């Protein structure tokens, strides 16, 4: 049916009432072959959701964001092969790589990095890089992928926290050991912790 409609020159980029295109919907449902078909008939791999709701969390989401969120690795492969932009940013600054790390999908993270996704892009209000998220969640395999792709071990969030500090704070000893073995500076963690302790003592009088 999809092929028939496209052969009858239906618009492959026609948006629905919520600002999504057919490719967004096919990606969300994990329909790899329909995605391939839509792209063959002119679907824009970088088409972004254009929500009518101001500041909607889905605004700006390209099919690659949807694939990362839904953990459809085969579709991520397809979109990367077709040349989709791997570094678009949504309203809060996140990229598809941020989303893939949040979902804990090492395979998708690896594929995005292979396609030149930026391991040091900053997103969320605190300015977290993908490595901050991986460290905070204890995803050691993803930490390795990111470090192998030259993620900045000393990148500080807007409140001064490094990935190592976040791994320690969240109670992930394996991630802590891994980051130290990769060259993360433990002095930074001690410095941040000391400043926090001083601030706490000051607030207590």
Image (cartoon, rainbow, N blue to C red):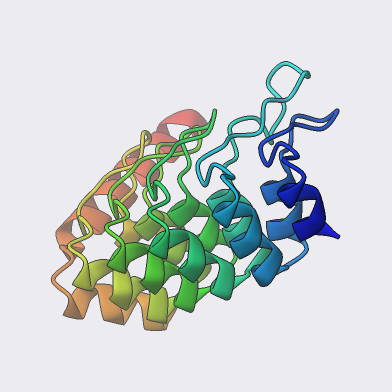
Q: Is residue 193 above or below residue 12?
A: below
Quadrant housing residue 51:
top right
Q: Is residue 175 above or below residue 36?
A: below
Q: How many marks?
A: 0
Q: Is residue 178 above or below residue 55?
A: below
Residue appearing at x 28%, y 80% in the figure: 178
Task: Give the left or right position of residue 49, taking residue 182 as reference.
Answer: right
Q: Residue furthest front?
A: 8
Task: Give the left or right position of residue 33, taking residue 171 as reference.
Answer: right
Q: Is residue 25 above or below residue 172?
A: above
Task: Give the left or right position of residue 114, taking residue 185 as reference.
Answer: right
Q: Is residue 169 visible from the viewing direction of this image?
A: no
Residue appearing at x 21%, y 59% in the figure: 153
Residue 172 appears at what percent x and percent y? 46, 75
Quadrant housing residue 109:
bottom left
Task: Give the left or right position of residue 104, taking residue 174 as reference.
Answer: right
Residue appearing at x 63%, y 69% in the figure: 71
């Amino acid at each position: 049916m999809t092929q028939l409609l496209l052969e009858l020159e239906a618009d492959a980029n026609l948006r629905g009432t919520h600002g999504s295109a057919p490719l967004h919907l096919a990606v969300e449902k994990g329909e790899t072959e329909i995605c391939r078909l839509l792209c063959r008939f002119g679907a824009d791999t970088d088409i972004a959701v254009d929500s009518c709701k101001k500041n909607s969390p889905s605004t700006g989401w390209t099919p690659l964001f949807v694939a990362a969120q839904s953990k459809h690795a085969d579709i991520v492969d397809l979109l990367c092969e077709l040349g989709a932009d791997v570094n678009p940013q949504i309203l809060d600054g996140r990229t598809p790589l941020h989303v893939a790390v949040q979902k804990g999908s090492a395979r998708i993270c690896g594929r995005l990095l292979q396609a030149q996704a930026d391991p040091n892009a900053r997103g969320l209000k605190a300015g977290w890089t993908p490595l901050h998220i991986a460290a905070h969640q204890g995803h050691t395999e993803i930490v390795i992928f990111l470090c192998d792709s030259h993620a900045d071990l000393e990148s500080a969030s807007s409140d001064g926290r490094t990935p190592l500090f976040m791994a320690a704070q969240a109670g992930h000893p394996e991630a802590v050991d891994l980051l130290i073995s990769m060259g993360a500076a433990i002095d930074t963690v001690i410095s941040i912790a000391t400043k926090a302790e001083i601030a706490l003592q000051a607030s207590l009088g």
